[in-house]
Image (cartoon, grey):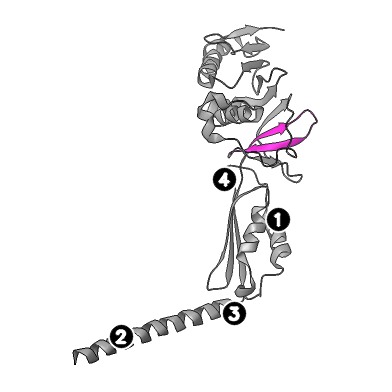
């Protein structure tokens, strides 16, 4: 008798598994046939200006998958759509997926430009928050810090460039101009006062940095991207206890290159 019930239990489990498999297969077939009723595109810009729009994404969708509305979901290759969108220079992350109601979701996170570089050939490109280079969008301009001067790098020659962020803790690796510009720009951008005050970075012939402020008729000689905490601490203190009293246009040059010094001069 026990053997009989054991056999019946096994048969029951087999039937349940088979039934579940049939149900799953039916659901998959129904999903495969379900027409796409809606395309939901969401783009997260963070704190950045718009560089990629829904119209851009619609154009990529059309080129990659044709008209998706009305097309059965089973005929829409979400992987190829993701790959096509990911190749767009301003896209940091993308996810394309569907639901059982017939909606195709496209979730995008845009890259955030940190610095706009203008090289000696007047070519312009961006450095983003992840340390990667981006081309300039001819239709939109990101309102970010600008660097110009003796910059030989270009986007075309360094399109796959990315700052080795992990190496920034070791000064031995500060051997490239772009890496130093990234370090300096990150520092300025994440300081509320400096972000509001510094408008431009100029790279001189010695690959040292000169800063152009928004307020005050002077140039700040920063030197290298080393000891930024100390240099900017002295600058802010001089602004607060010096220029606030004698006037912001008193000097043409404020030199904070050297340790424990703030040297001012008129030209």
Q: From the image, state whether disc 1 or disc 3 is nearer to you.
A: 3
Relative height, residue 13 to residue 57 (above, below)? below
Instruction: Please say whether residue 221 is visible from this viewpoint.
Output: yes
Name the residue at 52% across, 9% down.
260
In 3D space, how far apart are the residues under numbered discs 2 and 3 (Cα atoms)?
35 Å
Residue wearing tag 2: 10
In 3D space, how far apart are the residues under numbered discs 1 and 2 (Cα atoms)?
56 Å
The answer to which quarter of the image holds residue 158 is: top right
| Helix, strand or loop for disc 1 | helix
Name the residue at 68% across, 11% down.
252
Residue wearing tag 1: 56
Residue wearing tag 4: 46
Mark found first going from the N terminus, 2 or 3: 2
Relative height, residue 128 to residue 147 (above, below)? below
Instruction: Please say whether residue 191 is visible from this viewpoint.
Output: no
The region drawn magenta spans 114-129
| Helix, strand or loop for disc 2 | helix
Q: Residues within 10 Å of mark 1 (few under 14, many from 20)?
A: few
Name the one closer to the observer, 139 or 176.
176
Mark found first going from the N terminus, 1 or 3: 3
Name the residue at 57% across, 45% down.
46
Q: From the image, state whether disc 2 or disc 4 is nearer to you.
A: 2
**Disc 2, disc 3: CB below 8 Å?**
no
Residue 210 x %, y %:
66, 19
Q: Is residue 127 magenta?
A: yes
């Amino acid at each position: 008798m026990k053997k009989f019930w054991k056999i019946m239990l096994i048969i029951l489990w087999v039937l349940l598994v088979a039934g579940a498999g049939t149900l799953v297969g039916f659901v998959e077939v129904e999903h495969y046939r379900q027409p796409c009723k809606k395309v939901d595109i969401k783009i997260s810009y963070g704190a950045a200006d718009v560089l990629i729009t829904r119209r851009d994404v619609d154009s990529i969708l059309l080129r990659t998958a044709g008209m998706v509305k009305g097309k059965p979901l089973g005929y829409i290759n979400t992987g190829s759509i993701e790959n096509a969108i990911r190749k767009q220079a301003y896209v940091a992350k993308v996810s394309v997926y569907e639901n059982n109601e017939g909606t195709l979701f496209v979730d995008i996170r845009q890259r955030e430009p940190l610095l706009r570089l203008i090289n000696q050939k007047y070519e312009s490109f961006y450095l983003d928050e992840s340390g990667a280079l981006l081309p300039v969008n001819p239709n939109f301009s990101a309102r970010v810090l600008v660097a110009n001067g003796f910059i030989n790098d270009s986007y075309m020659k360094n399109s796959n460039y990315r700052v080795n962020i992990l190496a920034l803790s070791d000064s031995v690796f500060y051997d490239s101009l772009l890496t130093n510009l990234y370090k300096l720009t990150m520092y300025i951008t994440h300081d509320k006062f400096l972000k509001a005050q510094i408008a431009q970075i100029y790279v001189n012939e010695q690959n040292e940095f000169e800063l152009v402020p928004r307020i005050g008729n002077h140039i700040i000689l920063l030197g290298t991207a080393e000891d930024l905490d100390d240099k900017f601490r002295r600058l802010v203190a001089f602004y607060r206890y010096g220029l606030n009293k004698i006037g912001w246009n008193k000097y043409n040059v404020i030199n904070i290159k050297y340790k424990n010094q703030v040297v001012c001069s008129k030209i």
